Amino acid sequence: MVVKYFSDPYDELPGIIYWVMGSLSRITWDNVLVLAPFAAAGIFLFILFSFRLNILSMGDIQARSLGMNPSFFRIILITASSFMVAVCVATCGQIAWIGLVIPHLARTLAGPEHERMIPVSALLGGIFLLLADSLARSLSSAEIPVGIITALTGAPVFAWFMFKNRGSGWI
């Protein structure tokens, strides 16, 4: 907010606002070539540790009783996730709600086992982002930032998930 307040309202502020809302309009194939190895490595790491994620979801006591060090794996997975998010946000800005809504949708479709949920989540996230970007580019003559579309669809979908699964213990 401080950067937005002190920025030039004619030159710098529109770029900052556009980045905060997220957009794929300035992404080039060079950006994709830089981003793809990090995303692929992160997805591979999460698929590799998917069994460990299943164990971590049972709680620390059960994980320790099965011979796993929950703190060690939690640090690895949170670091990998943070790095993946940082690279994506640095590339296209903040595109909200995908990382919150899509995993819940994937869990509903594929079940709670991470071996199936992670690939389904990655595929659904990509499809949702492409559909939202297509909608953002076609709604008006000036491109709407894709973050607006994902927020307008993600918030009601998440509210529906919370209402539908209230009391079930997994949302």
Image: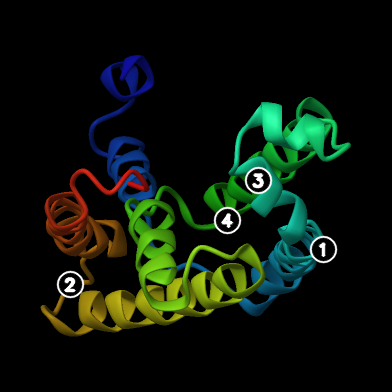
Q: Residue at x 22, y 81 (%)?
A: 135
Q: Earlier in the sequence, mark 1 or mark 2?
A: 1
- For label 4, the SS is helix
Of residues 4 and 120, the one nearer the viewer is 120
Of residues 83 and 72, the one nearer the viewer is 72
Dot 1 amino acid type:
Leu
Can you identify the residue that label 2 sits on? 142
- CA separation in Å, label 1 and label 2: 42 Å
Residue 25 in sight here? no
Number of numbered discs on residues: 4
Dot 3 amino acid type:
Ser
Residue 115's place in the image compared with 145, above or below, is below
Decide: marks 4, 2 in contact (CB < 8 A)? no
Question: Percent from the top left, x then y, of residue 160?
Answer: 13, 58
- Within 10 Å of the Cα at label 4, are there few (<14), some (14-19), or many (20+) other Cα atoms? many
Q: Residue at x 26, y 62 (%)?
A: 150
Residue 73's place in the image compared with 105, above or below, is above
Decide: marks 3, 4 in contact (CB < 8 A)? no
Can you identify the residue that label 4 sits on? 91
Which mark is in front, 3 or 4? 3
- Within 10 Å of the Cα at label 1, are there few (<14), some (14-19), or many (20+) other Cα atoms? few
Q: Residue at x 38, y 62 (%)?
A: 23
Dot 4 amino acid type:
Thr
Which mark is in front, 1 or 2? 1
- CA separation in Å, label 4 and label 2: 21 Å
Residue 22 position by quadrant: bottom left
Can you identify the residue that label 1 sits on? 48
Can you identify the residue that label 3 sits on? 81
- CA separation in Å, label 1 and label 3: 14 Å
Q: Earlier in the sequence, mark 4 or mark 2?
A: 4
Question: Percent from the top left, x then y, of residue 89?
Answer: 53, 48
- CA separation in Å, label 3 and label 4: 16 Å
